[in-house]
Image: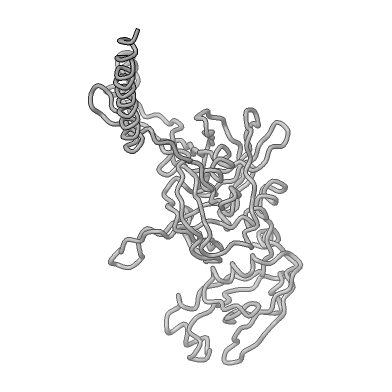
Amino acid sequence: MKILKKWFKPLLVLVGGFLAGLIGALVALNMVNVQTGNSTNSSGAVTSNVSYKNTTDTTEAVSKVQDAVVSVINYRTQSNNSTDFYMQMFGGGEDGQESSNELSVYSEGSGVIYKVDGKSAYLVTNTHVVDGAEQIEIMMSDGSKVVGELVGADTYSDIAVVKISSENISTVAEFADSDKLTVGETAIAIGSPLGTEYANSVTQGIVSSLSRTVTLTNESGETISTNAIQTDAAINPGNSGGALINIEGQVIGINSSKISSTSSQSGESVEGMGFAIPANDVVTIINQLETNGKVIRPALGISMVALSDLSTNAIAQLNIPTSITSGVVVASVQESMPADGKLEKYDVITEIDGKEVTSTSDLQSVLYGHAVGDSIKVTFYRGTDKKTATIELAKTTQDLSTNN
């Protein structure tokens, strides 16, 4: 018994030391794994075990509206010369050549679902996206497709409304008050750059500037001037009609265009200059398109040409001061229209409501910013005499068309 007691204490110390060493080794190994944050598999590849919060203000904003952003596909009839084996064997033209016309994809863009009304849902896109379409197809965020019906389109604002079935639509976009935008705030673009293959792409930037006047020429050769938000968020062909949103996930604008190169002979490359139609302008237009299928605007009742487009000989015949180098020349005045009795042929308009007018697009931009029934103050030169006239905009573009 004494012998057992004699050896028991040293044995206990030895076992305790072994266990302490084993525990220490395990703790050290575990600390190494924690510090590296990695584990290895049999092939030696390393994968991270580190977890982190991957939800940000941006991801939350995108999640609110992403399912409301769709792809818009424009189908047109195009001639297709093909060799058809069946026709070659059983007839159908010399050498089996058959010329056929069939609907095919002409262009692709983006759109934003903003309203559900019973069995119908409404989406906004750009007019140039659906222009000339014989069939419109909408690809939803989940990849499913539905046929769209054009409700109305407005060339000047480049805004169009398309109606689709509301079945399976769970998300609609919310418009922000674009008058409250601040230069430098976050701007996130969502759309289908380069078409449906890259649908629901997201890019981020800032609001670069407000109230830019962007002048474009459409397929019909018409000059279009739109008021736009400038952003450096990446916008590419196919993004047209998609959403530009703020950090709250609200739509602040509808993406419409970008500048990719200068118009100079050097053709210098330009980056980070995209444009979107402000949400407040969009809401005004889509409400009219839903109601009337078109936008009713005030009309002056004049035909016009930019002073800068005239030859020096023609300008000399106007007999205006030599200091006047820009403006809009009245080419004709239609009877019974607002300008009748106020303006005359060869008058040179230089200002409207105190805003400088240097081109026909400038005049349209100021004029179309007014509602029917408003009055405008027009500053113009009749020869060397500077004059002003207050004109009530009592007629519309519809009246203008009936007087042509």
Please determine whether, in this image, residue 158 is positioned above or below residue 111.
below
> Which residue is at 47% across, 87% downward?
316
Q: Quadrant of residue 295?
A: bottom right
Q: Nearer the viewer, residue 279 or 120?
A: 279
In the rendered image, residue 53, in percent from the top left (x then y), is placed at 48, 40
Q: Quadrant of residue 64?
A: top right
Which residue is outermost to the top? 1
Please determine whether, in this image, residue 385 is positioned above or below residue 363.
below
Q: Nearer the viewer, residue 47 or 143?
A: 47
Quadrant where the image shows the C terminus = bottom right
In the rendered image, residue 330, in percent from the top left (x then y), is placed at 58, 76
Q: Nearer the viewer, residue 261 or 171?
A: 171
- Total numbered labels placed on residues in the image: 0
255 horizontally vs 123: left or right: left
The answer to whether residue 132 of the structure is visible from this angle is no
Please determine whether, in this image, residue 251 is positioned above or below residue 164.
below
| Colour style of the rendered protein structure | one colour
Which residue is outermost to the front? 2
In the rendered image, residue 354, in percent from the top left (x then y), is placed at 63, 80
Which residue is outermost to the left? 43
The answer to whether residue 41 of the structure is visible from this angle is yes
> Which residue is at 25% across, 29% downward?
45
138 horizontally vs 375: left or right: left
In the rendered image, residue 351, in percent from the top left (x then y), is placed at 60, 80
Q: Quadrant of residue 353?
A: bottom right
Please determine whether, in this image, residue 232 is positioned above or below residue 349.
above
Quadrant where the image shows the N terminus = top left
> Which residue is at 53% across, 65% downward?
183
